[in-house]
Amino acid sequence: MLLKNVATISVTVFATVATLGQAAKSDISSVVAAGTVNGDIYRNAYFGVNITAPSAKFTAPSLVNVEGRRARLANIVYDSPEGAKNYTIGLLADSLENYPKGMSTSVYVRSVRHQLEREGLLQERDEFPITISGMSFIGAVLKVPEKPNFGYRRGIYATFLNGYVVSLEVQARDEEQITKMLSSAVKIAPKQNP
């Protein structure tokens, strides 16, 4: 009987340790800790994301909300002597636990777009599918008005990866520059995490 109880306790402890290990991997703090900046490159090992931005200023992480299970993993700003070449790239992670099961990336991007429209941005392009570094994303583009007949564009792109909504927010003069940044700066080789 004692041997049976010890075996049951051992299995329970092992299962608890294994479960705790899995929870720690998906905890937003662990996701944030998986990100590093080295020179002109931000890397996040949890998602397999690399963002390269020569001569830009990197802030990683720039916002972490542990209770809300979300974080702005990186904020990248490039200020060019030629203002028309300025851009920003943000990488965000938001736990899928924060949303209803079965929510699509289109619904997520649409809700973000609607929130930004309430804040004064102007819809420029509805949700659309786009491939970034070989992965399927849903995107939307808004105009950020600064003066009459002048402003810049803000693209929002999201995919589901390893239990999170992973979003890229790119701001630049026009959608062509945003598309160029997405194709040249962002590389994703997702790792399979529990």
Image (tube, rainbow, N blue to C red):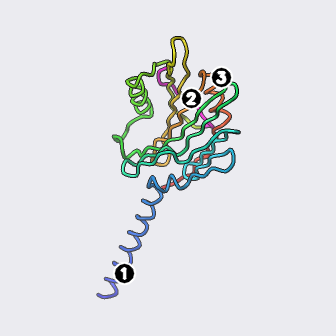
Expressed as whole percent of the image width and height from the top left, the position of residue 38 reads: 67, 50
Is residue 47 found inside the magenta-colored segment of the image? no
Q: Is residue 5 above or below residue 36?
A: below
Amino acid under disc 1: Ala
Q: Is residue 56 left or right of residue 74?
A: right
Task: Locate residue 171: give its quadrant.
Answer: top right
Cα separation, mark 1 vs mark 3, equals: 68 Å
Task: Locate residue 54: give its quadrant.
Answer: top right
* Label 3, residues with CA under 10 Å away: few <14, some 14-19, many ≥20: few
The magenta region covers 125-134
The numbered disc on residue 171 is: 2
Q: Are marks 1 and 3 in contact (CB under 8 Å)?
A: no
Amino acid under disc 3: Ala
Is residue 128 found inside the magenta-colored segment of the image? yes
Cα separation, mark 1 vs mark 2, equals: 58 Å
Q: Which residue is denoted by mark 3 in the rendering? A: 84
Q: Nearer the viewer, mark 2 or mark 3?
A: 3
For image coordinates 41% across by 73% down, the residue present is 14
Expressed as whole percent of the image width and height from the top left, the position of residue 73 reads: 52, 46
* Label 2, residues with CA under 10 Å away: few <14, some 14-19, many ≥20: many
Which part of the image, by quadrant, shows the N terminus?
A: bottom left
Expressed as whole percent of the image width and height from the top left, the position of residue 4 reads: 32, 83
For image coordinates 63% across by 22% down, the residue present is 176
For numbered disc 2, what is the local secondary structure?
A: strand
Q: Earlier in the sequence, mark 2 or mark 3?
A: 3
Q: Which residue is denoted by mark 1 in the rendering? A: 7
Expressed as whole percent of the image width and height from the top left, the position of residue 136 reads: 55, 35
What secondary structure characterizes most of the magenta part? strand
